[in-house]
Image (cartoon, rainbow, N blue to C red):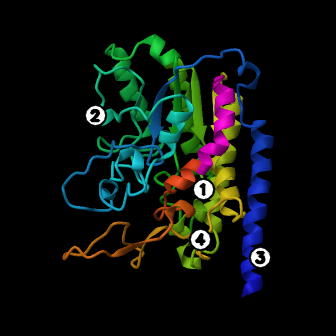
Amino acid sequence: MQQGRSQRLMSMKILPVVCCILLVLICGGCHVDAARRHSDRRRGYKLLVFGDSFADTGNRAPATSEKTSASRMWYYPYGSSDSAHGNRATGRLSDGLVQSDFLARIVGLDECPSPYRVWDRNAEFSGVNFAVAGAGALDGSPDVPSLSQQISQLRRLVDAGDIDDSDLDDSVALIAIDGLKDYASVDETTSANQIGALSQDVTDEIVDGVRRLQRLGVSKVLVNTVPPIGCQPWRSLSTGYNSCDNKGDMISIMHNTALTQKLRSSSRGGVLVLDLYAIFNNLLAGDSNSGFRHNNRPLLAPCCDTADPSGFCGQEDSWGRRLYSVCPAPDHTFYWDYVHPTQAAWRAVMNQLQGPIQDFLGI
């Protein structure tokens, strides 16, 4: 059994290296605009955020006062590590800050701009966050708009004169799509060809979103790769959180390969791919320097766990008794719940991306 565990850990260490090499070969380092990176040095970027729960800071309003899986981000224990907001739940799917919060600091803002849901057109403009938990590149709804619908929300603000051309030229946009919504239909019966076809549709929408933002006048666009989906706790649960799911990893590789190829061939420049896949994998490899080990907990285990696989973090019974548990050290745990990283994980990820982003933006 010890030998099998060693082999699994070795596979997790080797996989990110192989896939990182693949993405570099495809994307030439994933910096589409390397030749111009020092020609536009300036400060004071505004931030426009699009995507899903990796970046949502409060757009998914609870439909009722009842705590459900869809509204859990507004209740304890979400936000419990977020000292910047009084250690309370603020609509972020994490124990604290998420990717867009750390990106805001990198570009020189005190915090992520206001969610579109509560955006004040009379306030000083620092950007807008359009990202909504549960969104994807494909198929949206009024409550959970797709990437395309979120960009249309920006377009309406521009057409109404609430955002002017100079604001757009001074803006950097983040497209954060984690793949959960778009690839939710993939199961063990889904063939590689079917996954490949779906990944073409998803990445076509993302690339079209980049083009639309550029046509609107947004000068710089950051685009996430999807993370290693097979390593998310909801997929690794069947292995006791000890190894990643191969089908999930196939999704990530096919998506990221298609995305980087399309951005390289069709982009007009001004685009930087943020390789979450490689960085997540490197941090999940269990290197002693990563900080994500505590009392021999499986590295893929969520900090906030439930005994019921169909339950959710924060769930309570009709008597208000907790049906979940929270680990003693979220700052040493990578995953917060079955999908989302902890605040500490996002900090580690964005620390690795800070240099490339600042170089790309010339700040």
Q: Which residues are magenta?
A: 348-363
Vertical placement of 224 versus 357: above or below? below
Task: Where is residue 81? Give x, y as percent.
Answer: 43, 56
Q: Which residue is mark 4?
A: 294
Q: Earlier in the sequence, mark 3 or mark 1?
A: 3
In front: mark 3 or mark 1?
3
Q: Earlier in the sequence, mark 4 or mark 2?
A: 2
Q: Dot 3: few (<14), some (14–19), or many (≥20) neighbours within 10 Å?
A: few
Q: Is 354 covered by the magenta stretch?
A: yes
Q: Which amino acid does the dot numbered 2 rest on?
A: Val
Asked if labels 2 and 3 touch by Cβ distance under 8 angstroms, the answer is no
Q: Which amino acid does the dot numbered 4 rest on?
A: His
In front: mark 4 or mark 2?
4
Query: What residue is rendered at 45% in x and 16% in y?
Result: 167
Task: Where is residue 95? Give x, y as percent.
Answer: 43, 57
Quarter containing the N terminus:
bottom right
State the CA–CA distance, disc 3 to disc 1.
Answer: 27 Å
Q: Which amino acid does the dot numbered 1 rest on?
A: Ile
Report the front residue among 331 and 320. 331
In front: mark 1 or mark 2?
2
Q: Earlier in the sequence, mark 4 or mark 1?
A: 1
Secondary structure beneath dot 1 equals helix
**Residue 32: which disc?**
none
Q: Which residue is mark 2?
A: 118
Query: What residue is rendered at 56% in x and 54% in y?
Result: 345
